[in-house]
Each structure stands twice: as C-alpha cells, then as structure tokens.
Image (cartoon, rainbow, N blue to C red):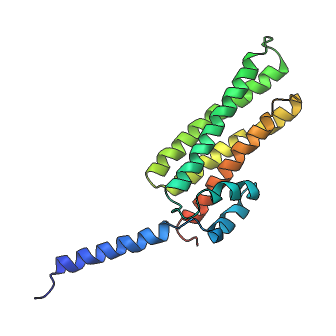
Amino acid sequence: MKPSLISIFLIFLILLKKSQANKTHKIVTDALIHKICPQTKNPPFCMYIMNQFKGKPLLPTPFAGVMGMAQNQAKTTKEKILGLHNGIKDDKSELKLRYHKCLEKYTNAMNQLNEANRFMNSANIRSVKHYTSLAMSGVQSCDKEFAKSHEPSNLSKDNRKFQDLCSVTLAICDQVLPGRH
C-alpha cells in the first residue's frame, strides 16, 4: 500500500513542527546562562535569577518568571514613590516634583510591561523586546532624580533592580529570537 500524498504531507508538518520547537525551546543550562548574563547590566544578579530555572525550557517559565519579577518590581517601586510623594505636603516642593516625574515614568513603564507581557503570551518576542526596552529606558532618568534628593529611601536601588530585571528579559529575548544560538 502506497502512502498517500496527504499522509506524507502530515508527517512532514509534524516533523517540521518538532524541529521548530527544538530550536526555540532551549533548556536553561550553565552554558546558556553564560551566554545570557554577560549581556545584562548586572551579570551576577542575572546568574542568581537564571540559576533558579536550571533544567527548564527557557520558554515559557523562566521568561515569564523574569517578566513577572520586573512587573512586581515596577509596581513596588511605584508604590514606594507614591507614598513618598504623598507624604510631602508642600505641592511646590522640588522633591515632590521629582517624585511626580518618576511616578509618571513608572506608570508608563508598567503599561509598557503589560504590552510586553501581552506579546509574550502570543510569542511575539521582537515586540516583547521593544516594549521591555521602552519600560527600562523610561525610568533611567529617575536615577538622576533620586540622586538629587539625597533621601534615604533606597529608591535608586529599587530603580536599578527594575532595570536589571528588564535587562535580563532583553538578554533572554536575544537568545530566543531567530538567528541567535
């Protein structure tokens, strides 16, 4: 009995799908961690994060996990800024204005990460990278604002942690995008 053209085509599609899945579902190994982390703003922090996911496929768990951490960090930092902002009674205070600027930037960053997350769910990695990059660059100027205030609330540290998490997400995107090994 000869195989029909349809059955040969179906077998071809199944094999094609499996070969594509193997290319995009890299397993988190020491070698992959050592490819990803040097691309980040804070390689030791990246290694700490990525080591938690060893042995798992890079997509979806580690990728979604790091994105979730970035979203939580943005929310926490925004809430901290809001508390400090609302604690200043003088509406014309320069410090209150600095906090207000960063509140707007973190609100925008959270919106950008929500977009990135939406694209992550549809496996559009280029758009994830684009929106994550926008979120990260949007809050970079807050470092300068926080440094001017000399206040002890660790906002600069929180801001850096957010940027570090975005940086890990961007490095993962680079590993997942076609043409990367």
Q: Is residue 151 visible?
A: yes
Residue 64's spot in the image, x, y percent? 53, 50
Q: Is residue 21 left or right of residue 91?
A: left
Q: Is residue 62 left or right of residue 156?
A: left
Give the residue displayed 67% in from the left and 27% down from the top: 79
Give the residue displayed 67% in from the left and 30% down from the top: 78
Residue 38's spot in the image, x, y percent? 73, 63
Which residue is the extreme one toward the left? 1
The residue nearer to you, when weighing 31 against 40, is: 31
The residue nearer to you, when weighing 53 against 173, is: 53
User: Residue 69 falls in which quadrant of the image?
Assistant: top right
Residue 170's spot in the image, x, y percent? 63, 55
Residue 119's spot in the image, x, y percent? 48, 49
The residue nearer to you, when weighing 6 against 87, is: 87
Q: Is residue 97 left or right of residue 72?
A: right
Q: Is residue 21 left or right of residue 63?
A: left
Which residue is the extreme one toward the bottom? 1
Vertical placement of residue 133 versus 146, above or below? below
Give the residue displayed 73% in from the left and 31% down from the top: 102
Locate the N terminus and report the quarter of the image it occupies: bottom left
Q: Is residue 109 visible?
A: no
The residue nearer to you, when weighing 52 against 9, is: 52
